[in-house]
Image (cartoon, rainbow, N blue to C red):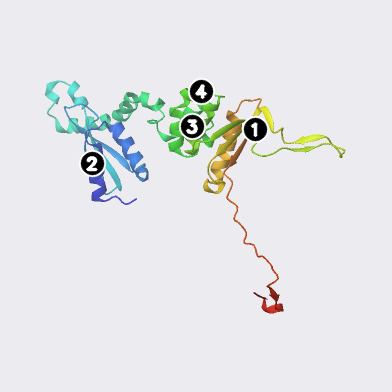
């Protein structure tokens, strides 16, 4: 992604006045291409620390440079050292290092919030909630599912809970039909050496079908596979479930009616 003056101005309008942690997260959410191109420069200030006061472009690093307020350790020294410019700048180096740790500690609670946590921590949260992270798809979907993980657990194993989970993952509200198959069962009985049922009985208390009101071609194949495995993981243990989609409309075939007025013309066709 090319970083120009217009982009820097847009970012500046967005982040100035915010806490540096929130400002960095906002930039990464709006411009994912800049995820590893954000640099923080702390400027000594008597005002509240870690507040963004400016934004520039670092030509050497080809990165966005955020300027944020910070304290200086020199304030803890006797007044006779307060005017020493070299000591002030020297101590600011160590303050930069301390600020990174302080920002992490100040925002430790955000790490446990699905909508705020860094991307690399999402699989850890998913594991804590017993959610298979690989079946969720994109990072955006994963954050939504984890955000509602606790309410979903209240309805786990129910029709409403499964419907809500599938909606979060697919973006489509499915219809769940209990006690019926999406197709007719085929029975083999009289007149054969085998008496058995293919698949399951058409009507049963431990069967349900999940219907998505779209054509299968309208949903990516990998998402269909993830939804299927998600169903197998979340369905009640003693049940069987089936996933199916809207059937495509059959095109009517044109019919030709032959009457007594038709005369066959051989290889040249038919004359009416």
Q: CA distance from mark 4 to mark 1?
A: 26 Å
Residue denoted by label 1? 180
- Considering the numbered disc 3 on the image, is that residue within a helix, a strand or a loop? helix
Nearer the N terminus, badge 4 or badge 1? Answer: 4
**Mark 4 or mark 3, earlier in chain:** 3
Real-space Cα separation, disc 3 to disc 2, in angstroms: 32 Å
Instruction: Identify the residue at horizontal 64%, vertical 62% (top origin).
Output: 255
Report which quarter residue 178 is drawn in. Answer: top right
Mark 4 and mark 2 in contact? Answer it, CB < 8 Å: no
Q: Residues within 10 Å of mark 2 (few under 14, many from 20)?
A: some
The vertical placement of 200 against 250, above or below, is: above
Report x, y in % for residue 261: 68, 72
Is residue 3 at all visible to an observer of this figure? yes
Residue identified by numbered label 4: 153
Q: Nearer the viewer, mark 4 or mark 2?
A: 4
Is residue 58 in sight in this rendering? no
Alpha carbons under labels 4 and 3: distance apart: 18 Å
The residue beneath circle 2 is 12
228 versus 263 height, above or below: above
Task: From the image, state whether disc 2 or disc 1 is nearer to you.
Answer: 1
Q: Is residue 220 left or right of residue 254?
A: left
Residue 179 in picture, x, y percent from top left? 64, 29
Residue carrying label 3 = 123
Dividing the picture into quadrants, the one containing residue 66 is top left
Mark 1, secondary structure of its residue: strand
Earlier along the polypeptide chain: callout 2 or callout 1? 2
């Amino acid at each position: 992604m090319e970083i120009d003056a217009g982009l820097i101005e847009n970012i500046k309008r967005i982040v100035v006045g915010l806490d540096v942690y929130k400002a960095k997260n906002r930039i990464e959410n709006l411009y994912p291409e800049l995820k590893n191109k954000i640099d923080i420069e702390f400027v000594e200030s008597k005002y509240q620390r870690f507040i963004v006061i400016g934004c520039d472009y670092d030509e050497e690093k080809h990165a966005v440079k955020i300027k944020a307020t910070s304290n200086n350790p020199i304030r803890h020294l006797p007044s006779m050292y307060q005017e020493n410019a070299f000591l002030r700048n020297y101590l600011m180096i160590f303050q930069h290092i301390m600020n990174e740790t302080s920002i992490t500690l100040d925002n430790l609670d955000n790490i446990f919030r699905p909508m705020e946590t860094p991307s690399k921590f999402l699989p850890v949260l998913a594991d804590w909630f017993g959610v298979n992270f690989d079946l969720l798809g994109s990072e955006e979907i994963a954050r939504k599912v984890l955000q509602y993980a606790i309410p979903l657990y209240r309805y786990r194993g129910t029709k409403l809970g499964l419907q809500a989970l599938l909606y979060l993952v697919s973006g489509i509200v499915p219809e769940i039909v209990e006690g019926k198959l999406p197709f007719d069962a085929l029975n083999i009985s009289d007149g054969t050496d085998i008496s058995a049922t293919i698949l399951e009985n058409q009507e049963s208390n431990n069967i349900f079908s999940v219907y998505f009101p779209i054509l299968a071609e309208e949903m990516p194949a990998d998402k269909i596979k993830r939804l299927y495995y998600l169903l197998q993981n979340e369905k009640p243990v003693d049940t069987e479930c089936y996933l199916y989609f809207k059937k495509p409309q059959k095109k009517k075939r044109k019919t030709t009616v032959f009457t007594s007025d038709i005369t066959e013309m051989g290889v040249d066709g038919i004359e009416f």
